[in-house]
Image (cartoon, rainbow, N blue to C red):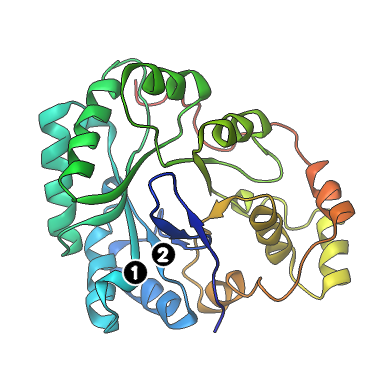
Amino acid sequence: MSQVPVIKLNNGVEIPQLGLGVFQVPNAETAQAVTTALEAGYRSIDTAKIYDNERGVGEAVRASGLAREELFLTTKLWNDEHGSDATLKALDDSLSRLGTDYVDLYLVHWPVPSQDRYVETWKAFEKIASDGRARAIGVSNFPQRHLQRLLDETGTVPAVNQVELHPDLAQSELRAFHAEHGIATEAWSPLAQGGLLAAESLVALGEKYGKTPAQIILRWHLQIGNIVIPKSVTPERIRGNIDVFDFELADDDLAVIGELDAGKRLGPDPETFGG
């Protein structure tokens, strides 16, 4: 079983550097995918209210027999729940669906600049953290200018910013801002939804190291310091995605992967989404 390293967040909480994402996994299939992942050695599961599968995650966690403190659960606030009171109620609802008293990480899913409520929302997140209902709080899909506003107008630096990040969208400037301010970078869609797996350079690196192109990409993420949450419901792929701790990419091979960056976004633009 793979031993996943941890990243220490800016409040001292430790998060596994690799976990399972369950975006677009139907609730009915989620429990089995999470069960497979836990059996393979995953201890971090990333869900969200909008995924409509928090119940499936909770079902698998309860059935696993693992102690709650052995697991790291992340969920997220959806765009129609910004604002102080709505945020507090949204977490109550998520905790009920997950069947737990707390989450390890609670994220503002999108900044939704058109609403201009994310600062108010973040202050509610500060209360959630102080109440112990989230061990760490962070954001998702926040560009630098919105992060800076949180830093300027509140007293709490987000522990994490979870953003679209893969070799085609390396987010170098944003990652540098994160590093400067002690914000951990977490990558969603770390495999670019499979769009890079046939890239000649990645196929060649896979042959060099005896790994799949997906494993090469995940290893790149880990070595540049990202937290990753690859999504799969296929048992073989779930197990393969965590089998990335028995090799290390050479510096020149990391550079080869870095050359793939084309600034190509697959998901929505955070500046306009949700408005």
Q: Residue at x 37, y 40 (%)?
A: 138
Determine the image quadrant of residue 216: bottom right
Q: Say the numbered circle drawn on residue 214.
A: none
Q: Nearer the viewer, residue 66 or 261?
A: 66
Q: Position of residue 111 (x, y in %)?
A: 37, 26
Write down the residue under mark 2. 44
Classify residue 29 by image quadrant: bottom left
Q: Amino acid at mark 1?
A: Leu
User: How far apart are the alpha carbons under marks 2 and 1?
Assistant: 6 Å
Q: Earlier in the sequence, mark 2 or mark 1?
A: 2
Q: How many numbered circles are shown?
A: 2
In this view, 263 is above or below 12: above
**180 in relation to 40, above or below:** above
- In the foreground, 36 or 70: 70
Q: Are marks 2 and 1 in contact (CB under 8 Å)?
A: yes
Q: Quadrant of the N terminus?
A: bottom right
Q: Quadrant of residue 243?
A: bottom right
For residue 262, say whether it is visible: yes
Residue holding disc 1: 71
- Position of the C terminus by quadrant: top left
Tell me residue 222's x, y (percent). Answer: 64, 57
Q: Amino acid at mark 2?
A: Ser
The image shows residue 28, relative to residue 222, as above or below, that is below
Residue depicted at 43% across the width and 44% down the height = 10
